Image (cartoon, helix red, strand yellow):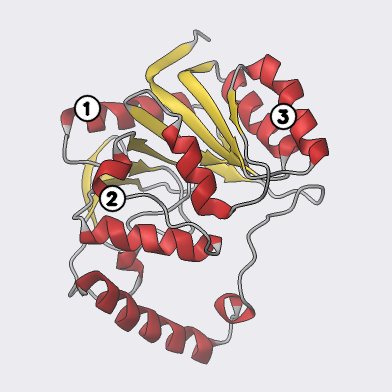
Amino acid sequence: MAPQQFKTVTLLVTHYNRSQSLERLLQAFQKQQILFGDIVVSDDGSRPEHLEELKRIQHQFGFRLITTPVNKGLGNNINKGQDAVKTPYTLYVQEDFDPKPGYGKHLRDAISIMDERADIDLVRFYAYFKYPYLKPYRDGFSEMIFRIWYPGYRKFHSYSDHPHLRRTAFFEKFGRYPEGLKGDRTEFLMAISFLKKKGKGMFYEDYKGLFDQVNSEDEPSTMKRSDLRQSNNPLIGLARAVYRNVKHTWEVLF
């Protein structure tokens, strides 16, 4: 397999106390011979043993390590990592995602789409659910279509912190991530900003076909959500859906 060069792309990985997961992610790209113009790892005040591991594998993978002395949350971690990126494009991946074999072809397709479509702000490679309103484009990608009057709250999730390619000038259009908030709130406020500023994005329709999310017993997910948000009770689910639709519509409009 010949190396696949992506000189216009920086791989940005946010990290917190999951050095084994980070090493596995970087090994997965290395195994596929996917080479980036730069790699930035933004650490959010991990414990000393994980920082030692980061410094050990830094020599192996050649990434730039951006640290902070204390944990400041997801918003700060993405902000300081993005500030360090110098290439035109940023591939943003959290440390618990691994690219599946053949990912390089789809990354090249995404770059090609963004090169030909100056209005496209990001290309999404993974999601928990399929974006509900899609217009087929090419190579398995479809454009996400948002209309405030379309039914359902899932239409508000054009932006997501799951793996995606974006223009490095993202902050200039949509602003920085809010800091000092819980991770899900930080992500939601960026999603609202994306919609308010008329953001446009592509969505890979086989949305679990390009990355695996891996949460091992040794390094479980660090994202905690409320019991109500995770409840399978149908009445709670219906009430939550109605509430989200009304609340999100208000936030986008006002």
> Which marked residue is nearer to the observer: mark 2 or mark 1?
2
Residue labelled with disc 1? 115
Cβ atoms at labels 3 and 1 below 8 Å apart: no
Q: Which secondary structure lies at badge 3? A: helix
Against 33, residue 179 (above or below) is: below
User: Residues under labels 2 and 3: Cα distance?
Assistant: 31 Å
- Location of residue 35 in the rendering, given as x and y in whole percent from the top left corner: 50, 16
Against 246, residue 153 (above or below) is: above
> Which marked residue is nearer to the observer: mark 3 or mark 1?
3
Q: In which image quadrant can residue 165 be found? A: top left
- Earlier along the polypeptide chain: callout 3 or callout 1? 3
Residue placed at 40% from the left, 81% from the top?
241
- Earlier along the polypeptide chain: callout 2 or callout 1? 1
Cβ atoms at labels 2 and 1 below 8 Å apart: no
- The quadrant of the rendering that contains the C terminus is bottom left
In the image, what residue type sits under mark 1?
Asp
In the image, what residue type sits under mark 3?
Leu
Residue labelled with disc 3? 54
- Location of residue 149 in the rendering, given as x and y in whole percent from the top left corner: 17, 75
Q: In which image quadrant can residue 85 be found? A: top left
Q: How crowded is mark 2: few (under 14 residues within 10 Å), some or many (20 or more)?
A: some
Q: Which secondary structure lies at badge 1? A: helix
Q: Which secondary structure lies at badge 2? A: helix
Q: Residue 174 carries which label?
A: 2
- Location of residue 9 in the rendering, given as x and y in whole percent from the top left corner: 39, 24
Q: Residue extending furthest bottom?
A: 235
Against 125, residue 223 (above or below) is: below
